[in-house]
Amino acid sequence: MYKAFLHTHTLVVTLFFLIYVVKTVLLLSNREDLLKRFTKFVKIPEMIVSVLFLVTGIYLMTQLPEIKMILWVKIGLVLLSIPVAIIGFKKGNKILAALSLLMITAVYGLSEMSRKQKPVIAVEGNLDGKTLYDANCKLCHGEDGKLGAMGSSDLSKTTMDVATIKQTILNGKGSMNKIVMSDEQASAISAYLESSIKGK
């Protein structure tokens, strides 16, 4: 279910962004007649996209193990950009419309930056499976492997063998980023999962 909401959110955010780009370009290029027609044409789809943007965004927020400052910044920019855009387009104010687009672009950029975060780096030389699990996996999978935050798998029910778990840790899978660590450290986490979490 998480992945469906994530893909829907990504789609509606992209559509929302494109609608604002087109409207702003039309306003800035003094194409008021075309802007009015485009606005009328996308009125209902824009309302649907906006509602889906909100609903999927709220759902995804509830799935986060922790809410970081960058998310609050993104929410603030989105909430600020909406009235600025409404006033800008209703009054034909190019500065406000451009400012709104700039804020939406910043949100989009921040989202891409946070999505492509650097992988977690394990503590060098540490081969304790539980310590490595707690530092790198617990946030999304939970203490017992069952948390399922951000679409993560229930590790207590996984059918993956130790070698597959190790490869998933080192290469990532789905929404999980790869973790930069040694083969030995990935093996230690895999062994810990096999002995302490899997099948519990």
Image (cartoon, grey):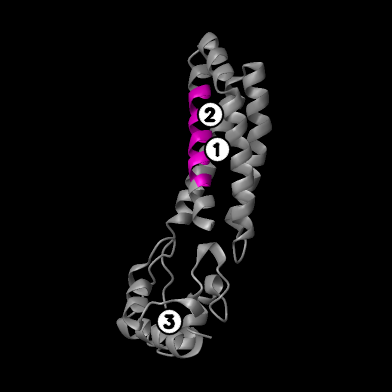
Front position in the image: 87 or 49 = 49
Give residue 21's position: percent from left, percent from top: 49, 28
Front position in the image: 38 or 48 = 48
Q: Which residue is mark 2?
A: 20
Give residue 153's position: percent from left, percent from top: 49, 69
Give residue 185's position: percent from left, percent from top: 37, 84
Task: Answer whether labels 3 and 2 touch (C-beta < 8 Å).
Answer: no
State which region is magenta. 8-24
| Helix, strand or loop under label 2 | helix
Q: Which residue is mark 3?
A: 123
Where 101 sits versus 136, above or below?
above
Where 60 sits versus 55, above or below?
below
- Identify residue type, mark 2: Tyr
Task: Answer whether labels 1 and 2 touch (C-beta < 8 Å).
Answer: yes
- Identify residue type, mark 3: Val
Labels 1 and 2: the sequence-earlier one: 2
Q: CA distance from mark 3 to mark 2?
A: 44 Å
Labels 3 and 1: the sequence-earlier one: 1
Q: CA distance from mark 3 to mark 1?
A: 37 Å
**Quadrant of the image containing the N terminus:** bottom right
